[in-house]
């Protein structure tokens, strides 16, 4: 009995030892790779092994990081959009093979014929043959797209589908407008704005999802920074509103941990809403990219699903490995190649220590 108790005590001490060691490593990486604030977590389906927020909300030592700081998720928003879509398909409110113009027939005649047969599944798995478009594109202009947030997304996709494009065949088409179109389909199927669908999901999971730059509503939240460490002042970005369902959600690290743990629980067959098969289809149903999740098999044979976000002045990463029941989440309030290298060093170290 004494040996068993000693062994249990040892197991309980290991995560604490890792946490202390990794905290020091993360702080060193934060300073070396010029990251104002670095937040990271290691979780299982039912436990949090590590969760830290280091540094500063702004490139300013007077704005100390807090654990509940909010970060822009960027393209990690797609993991949330795809989960909402999966729930709506399960509820029978829409089908994977529903075509965009089944729901928006009034846009079809003026649209590029190459878009006629695209389905919800095509959009969410990046199999719709669409060109790349992001917040850096110069057209359309703000004057061309009018109305409230929902109307602007409608006007944007109407404009986008009118363009004359014929994309070369690829395995995957990394086009943000695919998720704009998917978001519009979910709005039409439910009669609710995308923002409402996200808020309702958040309420059901006890997660506070929001949109845009965290410092718009509260200047004491993290400010994003560009590669020159110039802080992004509070401002509405109309292009990122057009891309809401593709990359405009913000939330805290503890809240995204809840979402990630829910995904792990589902992959392990512990969800009451979706089967393990449905979660596996979401993460691994297609090669390389499925419904909001990329996937890879590492050299050690472990299979991961993951996503990265880069909305201009933030970086985010999430990596899940159900076979070891672990997930790794990293947030930074700067976007640069240097910062991304630092995050990958920390990620690899965390995976190595936790058996991944």
Image (spheres, grey):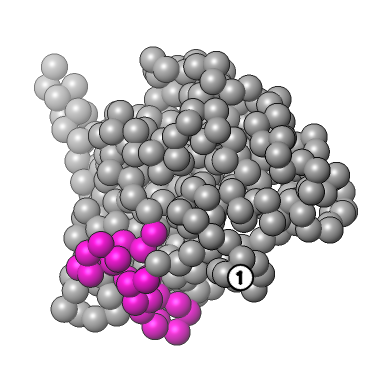
Q: Which residue is mark 1?
A: 141
Q: Hey, which quadrant is residue 101 in on the image? A: top right
The residue positioned 85% from the left and 44% from the top of the image is 113
Q: Quadrant of the N terminus?
A: top left
Q: Is residue 336 left or right of residue 158?
A: left
> Percent position (x, y) of residue 226?
45, 77
Residue interval drawn in magenta: 212-235
Residue at image coords 49%, 48% = 150
The image position of residue 217, as x and y in percent, is 25, 62
Give the quadrant of residue 96: top right
Taking the magenta stretch, the answer to whether it contains residue 354 is no
* Left or right: 309, with 9 as reference point: right
Instruction: Classify mark 1: helix, strand or loop.
Output: loop
* Nearer to me, 10 or 227: 227
Viewer-closest of 349 and 71: 71
Please report the residue visible at 70 percent of the width from the left and 25 percent of the height from the top. Answer: 97
Q: Does residue 136 show up?
A: yes
> Can residue 230 be found in the magenta stretch?
yes
């Amino acid at each position: 009995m004494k040996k068993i108790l000693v062994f249990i005590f040892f197991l309980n001490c290991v995560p604490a030892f890792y946490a202390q060691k990794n905290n020091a490593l993360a702080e060193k990486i934060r300073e070396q790779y010029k990251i104002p604030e670095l937040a990271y977590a290691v979780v299982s389906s039912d436990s949090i092994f590590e969760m830290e927020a280091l540094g500063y909300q702004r490139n300013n030592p007077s704005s100390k990081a807090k654990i509940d700081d909010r970060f822009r998720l960027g393209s990690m928003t797609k993991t949330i959009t795809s989960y909402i879509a999966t729930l709506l398909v399960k509820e029978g409110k829409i089908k994977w093979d529903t075509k965009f113009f089944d729901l928006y027939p009034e846009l079809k005649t003026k649209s590029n014929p190459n878009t006629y047969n695209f389905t919800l599944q095509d959009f969410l798995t990046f199999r719709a043959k669409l060109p790349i478009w992001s917040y850096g594109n110069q057209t359309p202009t703000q004057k061309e797209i009018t109305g409230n947030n929902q109307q602007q997304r409608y006007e944007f996709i109407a404009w986008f589908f009118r363009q004359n494009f014929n994309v070369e065949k690829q395995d995957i088409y990394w086009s943000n407008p695919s998720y704009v179109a998917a978001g519009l389909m979910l709005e039409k199927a439910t009669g609710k704005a995308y923002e409402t669908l996200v808020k309702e999901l958040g309420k059901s999971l006890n997660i506070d999802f929001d949109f845009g730059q965290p410092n718009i509503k509260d200047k004491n939240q993290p400010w994003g920074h560009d590669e020159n460490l110039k802080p992004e002042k509070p401002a509405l970005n109309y292009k990122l509103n057009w891309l809401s369902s593709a990359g405009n959600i913000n939330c805290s690290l503890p809240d995204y941990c809840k979402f990630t743990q829910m995904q792990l629980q589902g992959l392990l067959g512990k969800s009451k809403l979706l089967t393990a098969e449905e979660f596996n289809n979401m993460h691994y149903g297609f090669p390389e990219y499925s419904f909001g999740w990329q996937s890879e098999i590492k050299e050690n044979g472990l299979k991961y699903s993951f996503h990265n976000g880069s909305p201009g002045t933030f970086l985010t990463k999430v990596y899940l490995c159900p076979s070891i029941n672990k997930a790794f989440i990293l947030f930074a309030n700067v976007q640069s190649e240097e910062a991304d290298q630092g995050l990958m060093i920390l990620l690899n170290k965390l995976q190595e220590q936790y058996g991944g």
